[in-house]
Image: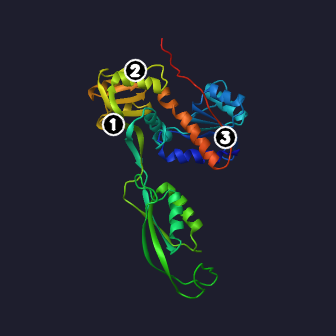
Amino acid sequence: MISCQTVINIMEKLAPRKLAMEWDNPGLAVGDFAGKISKILVALTVTPEVVHHAAQNGFDMIISHHPMIFKPIKALRKDLPLGKMVYEAVKHDITIYSAHTNLDIAQEGVSEVLARVLELEDVRVLKQTTEEPLKKIVVFVPRGYEDVVRNAMGEAGAGFIGNYSHCSFNIEGKGTFKPEKGAKPFIGEEGKLEKVDEVRIETIAPESLVRKVINAMLKVHPYEEVAYDIYPLENTGNIFGLGRVGNLKKSVSLKSLCETVKLRLSAAYVRVTGELDKEISTVAVCGGAGGDLISAASFAGADVLITGDVKYHDAVDAKAFDLAIIDAGHFSTENLVLPALAHYLEREIQLLGEKVDIEVYKDEEPFKIM
């Protein structure tokens, strides 16, 4: 059993709330941060059926993709669906939390999972929404301790450049200090100026990991008072955004890709625009409703956009861009993130030495083909 706050910390490590679009409403909707969690139900949407299932099966928490409370509400009536869900959740002490556009945008979020399921290569962000700043961290370490300090910082996430980790630059020099009254120096004596052989270690870290890196460094650094600097950088940091674009291992016809999408996404149907014999090699994807990414997909060089909830005028615009569209539905392009999310939660909770039961709610596409 762990606290609700711990579960939220794990979720926001994957999908920080700051990534969410300003019109969105992710986060804690029902419950409190101090609540105790032993059983989690992961669902795409909070529906009366989902809440009832949680209540009947002893779940303490529902984690959904779509926020249960999206628009401002003026009343909570038990005779209406939203009020009924809130009352039942409160009655059974069920916490409800959502990660919406922040999970769409996250590096391991909805569209990333969609791209992986379709086995796209050279995957990149389709439409950038934000960039995480990078910081340079500099610390001064007595000679002989540089390896342990450098490794601790690297293990905490510092020094990642492309596919390389633990990157740093090291310069040897002289450090000076005079321990004053009350000091307990690792090297030197009270009241005496000391000159010590030291190593200046420079590395980089994304802004979100700076505090973690500093804490890891302080734990292993031998000095009582550690001298370190943090500098802002103009270098490009981690890119976050909506959708993904990548390449197929080998080009296929649009018709063949439609069949692959149906199979991989377990979709009951797809809608398609474009010539079915069109050759497809570069694919843009966006889980949920991605019709507003048509121009971005075209400018990214995509031959097709795979998404859901495409409107008539979106399809007309896509035709003008000579961009094919495969509309596999909102449900099918997002539901596939749930098993990945459940696996992530299980792994992170186990790393804390805790055990929480996690279940994925088995929902189905709301539309039927007649």
Callout 3 secondary element: loop
Count neighbours of disc 2 (C-alpha within 10 A) and say few if under 14, some if 14 to 19, many if 20 or more. Answer: few
- Please state the horizontal and vertical placement of residue 1, each as a whole percent of the image: 71, 44
Report the residue at 54% width, 65% height from top: 217
Q: CA distance from mark 2 to mark 1?
A: 20 Å
Name the residue at the top extreme: 370
Query: How many numbered circles does the render carry?
Result: 3
**Circles 2 and 1: CB distance less than 8 Å?**
no
Label 2, secondary structure: give it.
Answer: strand
Question: What amino acid does circle 2 point to?
Answer: Arg
Numbered disc 1: secondary structure:
helix
- Residue flagged by tag 3: what amino acid is it? Gly
In x, y percent, where is residue 206?
46, 56
Image position, residue 74 (x, y; %): 59, 33
Please determine whether, in this image, residue 198 is positioned above or below residue 362: below
- Vertical placement of residue 324 versus 21, above or below: above
Residue at 59% over, 66% down? 219
**Nearest-to-viewer mark from 2 and 1:** 2
Of tags 3 and 1, which is closer to the observer? 1
Q: Residue at x 59, y 84 (%)?
A: 180
Q: Is residue 165 above or below residue 250?
A: below
Identify residue for label 3. 31
User: Rounded to the nearest whole Å, what is the CA distance between mark 3 and mark 2?
Assistant: 40 Å
Q: Residues within 10 Å of mark 3 (few under 14, many from 20)?
A: some
Q: Which residue shows up at 30% across the image and 34% down it?
A: 298
Q: What residue is disc 2 on?
A: 271
Q: If you read the primary sequence from the N terminus, does the residue marked by circle 3 or circle 2 appear first?
A: 3
State which tag comes first along the sequence, 2 or 1.
2
| Residue linked to disc 1 | 296
